[in-house]
Image: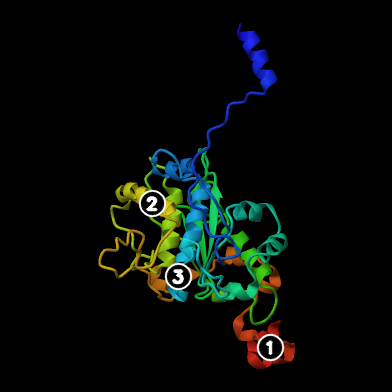
Amino acid sequence: MRAHIRKENEKKDVKSAVPAYPLFPTTPSPTTSSSCTGIQINLKQALQVLNPDKGTPTICTQVQLEFICGTKITQIYGTRPCMGKEHRVKNAKFFCLYQEFYKNLMGNTPQYMTKQVVRCLSRRRFWNLRYLFIPIKFTPVGQSMLHAALCAISPEAKTVDYVCSDGDTGLLNSPQSSGSECLPAIFAWLTDYLGKHRHSSLFPFDWKKRVNACRQQSCFRGDCGIYSSTYAMCLAFCYGIGVRTGSFARDHQAKFISRRRRYAQDLLNRGFAPFDPSWNAPNWQYYPLLDNKPTASKCEGFIDIPLDVIDKLPRAAANRRACYIGCRTRAKLLLHCRRNARF
């Protein structure tokens, strides 16, 4: 009997429909936004954020970064990108690269990555940015799940922030075993990406880096993705993440359970919204937005680029200094400083 029913169904080509999860709102498309790419997530991916035993889906982290960049454009230019009604802004102050950038960076040459990045971010636009956010994903030793960190490059302040809630520094001598080791590769890519023009190229001795501004996450929960996006929000909204201006409470590990609920709410409501002064406005999606310029203050943990990172750069770039821009010949170099005679 069952065989007969199976044959009849095969003749009728009866197929059971696969249930589909409802779709969450998408980020604005690249034709209407300078920082969003039209990413779409479903209900299952968004609600997974609420489970403290699981990590945040990578696609949700990318959506949150795009909403953060778009919301800051709202503050500066008076448009409303989160609600899908924005106009494309040419000189946006924030931008985030795609999730696979780190993987491609560690497996390819800086020249190849330059060709990939210039398609979405020109060099002129890079120097107009306040922050460029780069999501970092790697698998530490003894773990099977990906770990999320964040690299925030500030062309305005000439700083590089590497924040990891598991103690990784992004350097070759990181205390975290099997860290990302991405900072030397990022500086090598930046050197090639910015080119050799004397006014726009990378001068490594003018830049500062910081790797100790992160807070330690709970080892019993997969909060790394939420920490990374929260770091990006604190930098973009000018709340600060340093030792003196940090916006993380002492009991941040306990409060991140509530932060998960707010994270899912932000995804559901397509990011954030400006303040509505109406008396009955709930302002559920409003975050205070500041407009303070970033600084490379030593008291906040910024230090010079390590020599082991500079040594990885091409020789011409490693010895490049801004004070020698006008010295294009050996004669002018000697006039600038007699110590250069030994060269």
Q: Is label 1 or label 2 in front? A: 2
**Left or right, 196 with reference to 309:** right
User: What's the CA distance linking mark 3 and mark 1?
Assistant: 43 Å
**Residue that label 2 marks:** 265
Please identify the residue farthest to the left as the structure is shown.
279
Looking at the picture, tell me which residue is in the foreground, 131 or 186.
131
User: What's the CA distance linking mark 2 and mark 3?
Assistant: 19 Å
Tell whether label 2 touches label 1 (CB within 8 Å): no
Please identify the residue farthest to the bottom as the structure is shown.
335
Q: Answer with the quarter of the image where residue 171 lies.
A: bottom right
Q: Which mark is residue 327?
A: 1
Alpha-carbon neighbours of circle 1 within 10 Å: few (<14), some, or many (≥20)? few
**Residue that label 3 marks:** 74
Residue 20's spot in the image, x, y percent? Answer: 53, 37
User: What's the CA distance linking mark 1 and mark 2?
Assistant: 56 Å
Q: Secondary structure at mark 1?
A: loop
